[in-house]
Amino acid sequence: MKQLSVWEVVWDAAGVRLVKRGGGTWKEARTEIELADGSIRKPMGGKIDGTVIWWTFEGGLEVRQEFAEEEGWLQVGTTLRNLSDAPVALRRVHVLSGNMDKVPWERIFAQSNTMTGKVGLFELSGSFESDACIGLTDSAGTRALVVGFEKLDDAFYRFHIEANAEGCAVDPICLREGIPLAAGQELTISPMLLGVGESLSDLMGEYAARTARALSARCSGETMTGWCSWYHYYGKETADDILANARALADSPLRGQLRVIQIDDGWNLPHKDHARAWGDWFPGGKFPQGMRAVADELHELGYQAGLWLAPFSVDKSSRLAAEHPDWIVRVKNAETGLLDPAGPGSVLGLDLTHPEVLAWLHETFQRVFHEWSFDYVKIDFLMHGVLPGLRHDPERTTAQAFRQGMEVIRKCAGSEKFILNCGSPLGPAIGMCDAMRIGPDVGGRWYAPMNPDQWPHGNCCIRAAAYPVLFRQWMHRAWWQNDPDCLIVRDAAVPFEIEAMSKLKERLKARDLGVEAKDFGLSREEADFWVRAVWLTGGMDVLSEAWSNLSQERRERLLHAFPPHQHTVRWLDFYEHPDVCVLKTMDGPLMVGFFNLSDESHTLSLPRERLGSAVKWREWMSGEILLLEGASARFPVLDPRSARIWMAQDTILDGKA
């Protein structure tokens, strides 16, 4: 095959081999097609013409793959054609599934497709599933490879990786969900991108920028700050509680630092103990004056008004479910053969391809934004919009259905209103929201195990929230503003936290935490860890503490997080310990942040060239002074569950201070 300027694409009997600058990168790669019945169509043959490969398959299917270069990245375009006289139901397209040598790769970045799941940097051994992209590196951070799909709005894209001592098999997948490709029609899926270089951090940043351009990401504007009601009241708050907290914060040292007061779940309930009623988005008995009156008072206090909704979710007990059963996604019951509403437990998912559902969404958000005058919405549990099942339009993927629903909300919001997605698919939301929750819920504990097989870092705790905040920082200011979830610094339980954690105990079943009030509250190091992580990564800065309930010492710690950090932060490319993340500012004052997520102490020594020539450093929160001299910069012991941010105080130029 014709050699490109940087990459070489070779096709032989073993499959496709992709090589950059003389080093083997990807080999024995073939594109395969998986049909809805589970059968696999493997290529029967093909032809080459310049930078294009045609694969031919049984049953009249053909795949055209074109290879191009841009700024050092290899782009693989894929188009399927059905040359037969009958439709073909496609389940998955395996795009150049191939193998790599294990050397030099020692670490893998992998992630889930929403805020929960397995996210982080891991030792490259065993099986991994990753949404949209993967990153590989050596532990020293000197060689890296990133593979990812560029346009994430037409389908969900996934990588399956199997790694052992001999090598690493990588399977990039486009999920087509059984949708037929009509006779004589063609389907173009997202281009796949491959980047090779020295820095995993740089490559992840470049991948994020390319994807952002392809989907017109919204990532400009002032960092959102504010207060959220959830982690103190857990849905039990009234309008009076909201306004009392807003007034208290207006009289606190945080006056002028917080932009929005966000009312969380529970505002639509008739009373505080009423069953949940998602889908019926009207003020309940706890807000007797109505939502416009509350928004007006928040505006008078100098705040933006924010409101929580779960717009793609419907409770079985809601009026909406009773009045519009045809609006709900359906699944076939294997036992009865009937079509049942789709959803986990008592929650159902709306069919976002149904014209009447889209009209209802428009009416709902016109009311919230323009009749009630809210400036900001947090829209949650959005994964219910992509539940598998039968929809009004069977030719749209769940990713396309989701984006269709988001487009309605975005249109109602216009350019001025702020949309925070939560519990959301990531890729299809790019360009539709202003901010994204990128990790699990926080809570008043460092660690809380929940569904440990699916969520190895837990949930409703600081540790679980911290992994995505640190390892998804490359998304921030590229795809959206990252939302790390709320700032929590409390040293004791809040009134409603025990109730919330009792639900955690129920879900753990055989695992008994023995949770009591005394078990809640963060140690000083744990609270400081979270303040440092939220501040340095630069995402949304929203607290969820009742100011009057905090001790003076915890108030002072919280104040460090404001105003938000505005400079670009990326990984330092030091991956010796997968549970220790090292971040560095890329512009502005030089800072290096160390975050120990493990329960072990670590001492880190970094090559001097990674840090510049500064000798004197000051810790951002404590004020501790550190002198670093020599070719290797050895930092103080990092205790378990702790973090430090070191700020360069001087620079040596030409041998002079």
Image: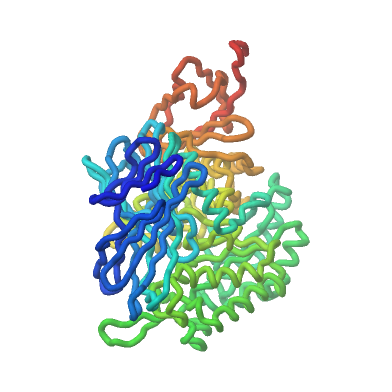
Q: Residue at x 48, y 34 (%)?
A: 572
Along the line of sight, the residue nearer the viewer: 262 or 537: 537
Q: How is the image coloured?
A: rainbow
Which residue is pictured at 41% across the width and 60% down the height? 78
Most extreme residue toward the top is 655
Q: Position of residue 208 (x, y in %)?
A: 51, 49
Q: Could you say where residue 10 lies in the image, as x and y percent from the top left?
A: 33, 47
In the rendered image, residue 571, in percent from the top left (x then y), is placed at 48, 38
Which image quadrant: the C terminus? top right
Residue 636, horizontal then vertical, whole percent: 45, 24
Residue at 69% x, 48% y is: 257
Q: Nearer the viewer, residue 108 or 237?
A: 108
Q: Residue at x 43, y 44 (%)?
A: 4
Note whether residue 51 is visible: yes
**In the displayed structure image, the side of residue 267 where residue 445 appears, left or right:** left
Seen from this angle, which residue lies furthest right? 300
In this rendering, the answer to whether 301 lies above or below 223 is below
Identify the residue at the far front of this view: 49
Q: Name the quadrant containing residue 102.
A: top left
Q: Is residue 429 left or right of residue 386?
A: right
Can the viewer see residue 516? no
Look at the picture and state if 538 lies above or below 424: above
90 and 451: which one is in front? 90
Total marks drawn? 0
